[in-house]
Image (cartoon, rainbow, N blue to C red):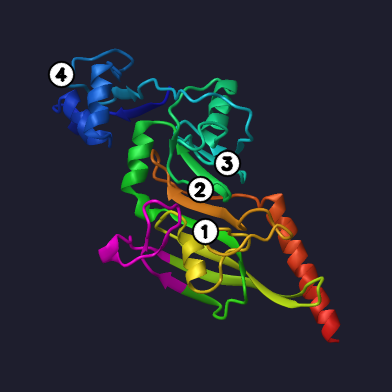
Amino acid sequence: MREYTYTLKKEDEETPLKDLLRKKFDFSSRLRTKIKRERLVFLNGEEPVMWSCGKAGDVLSVRMPEERSGFEPEDIPVDVIYEDDDILVINKHPGYICHPTKGHVSHTMANGIMKYMIDSGQSFKIRFINRLDMDTSGTLLIAKNAHAQADFMKKAKHAEKIYSAIVDGSVEEDEGVIDEPVGQPDPEKVERGVVPEELGGQPSVSHYKVEERFRCLTKGGETKDYSLVKVLIKTGRTHQIRVHMAYIGHPVVGDHLYGEENPLLIERHALHAEELSFDHPATGERLHFEAAWPEDMKRLLDILREGAKKYEQNRQ
C-alpha cells in the first residue's frame, strides 16, 4: 500500500495534526476526507488524535486507501517501461483501446493491466492519464492512486508528448506549428476536424519537425512522396495529430478516417507515441520515457527507404 510521510520540524510542534495533513500533503479535500474516514493517518506508526500536536522528529504518515479495479483480466501484452508505487508507464501495442466502452466491452488495455496487476501481486485502481487511439501505439501513463491522478490533472500543461508519424507527401517546411482548434463537427460521427472555437472547437497546437523525406519508386513505376515527422503536443485532443496533419495536406499513412487505408504498407495509421515527459506526482522529479517503435512501423520505414533507394538508382 502506498504511504506518504513527513517528519515534523520544530516549527510544526504547535500545529494540530489535522492542519499539518492539509499543509504538508498536497491531497485533494475529497481524498483527505476519505483518508480520515478510513483512519489512514499515523504518527510514529500509531493512530493519533487529529487535533493534537506532535513533536520535532515525529513521523506523520498517510496510507492511500485500498483500491482495486474490477475489469475482467485478459492475457493482453503489457510492455512495462517504468513502474513505481504511484505510476505505471507502458508501451501500448496497436490494436487495443484503453478501457471498455459500449462498442468494446472487453479485450482492452484495462483488461490486460488487470491481469498484470493480479500476476504481480498488486492492488490499485487503473487510472489512465493519457489516452491513445486503438491503432496508435506508444507511451501510456497510468496513475495508481487518487493523489497521483489529481497531481497529473493539475500539472497537465507541463507534460510533453512527442509522436512519430509517417505521413503522405513531402512536407515542404522543415518544421512548423499547426495552431487550429479541434472539435467534433457531427456529434453522431467519430470523426474530428478543425472547428472554430465559437462552434465548439478546443484550442490545439501541434509542433512538427521533418526527420526524413522519401521519394519512392513504386512497383508500378510511379513516384510517390512520404515524410517522417516528429510532432510535439501539449494538448491532447481526440485525433489531434491525425486531424492537424490531414489539415495541412499530409494525412498519416494508413489513416482510414482522415486519409486512406494502405494495407500494402501498413494495416493501421502509422502513428506512435514515442516520448513522454512529466513531473513525478510524489517527488516532483522530471521524468522522460521513450517507447520503442513497433515492428509494423519499422517495416514501413524500411519499405520507404528501399523505395527511395530504387528511385535514386533509377535516376542514375
Segment colored magenta: 177-205
Mark 2 lies on residue: 132
Q: Give the residue type that dot 3 points to.
A: Tyr
Is 272 located above or below residue 124 in the figure? below
Task: Please name which of the two marks, 4 or 3, marks the residue nearer to the observer.
Answer: 3
Based on the picture, tell me whether residue 186 belongs to the magenta stretch.
yes
Residue 213 can be seen, yes or no? no
Q: CA distance from mark 4 to mark 2?
A: 47 Å
In terms of depth relative to the viewer, which is nearer, 7 or 224? 224
Is 227 located above or below residue 257 in the figure? below
Question: Mark 1 or 4 closer to N-term?
Answer: 4
Quadrant assignment for the N terminus: top left
Q: What residue is shown at x 21% (from left), y 21% (from top)?
A: 54
Q: Give the residue type that dot 1 points to.
A: Ile
Prevailing secondary structure of the magenta residues: loop
Residue 107 can be seen, yes or no? yes
Residue 153 point in image, percent of width and height: 34, 45
Mark 1 lies on residue: 162
Q: Give the residue type that dot 4 points to.
A: Ser
Q: CA distance from mark 2 to mark 1?
A: 13 Å
Q: What residue is shown at x 72% (from left), y 57% (from top)?
A: 298
Question: Mark 3 or 2 closer to N-term?
Answer: 3
Residue 2 point in image, percent of width and height: 41, 26
**Mark 1 closeness class: few <14, some 14–19, many ≥20 residues within 10 Å:** many
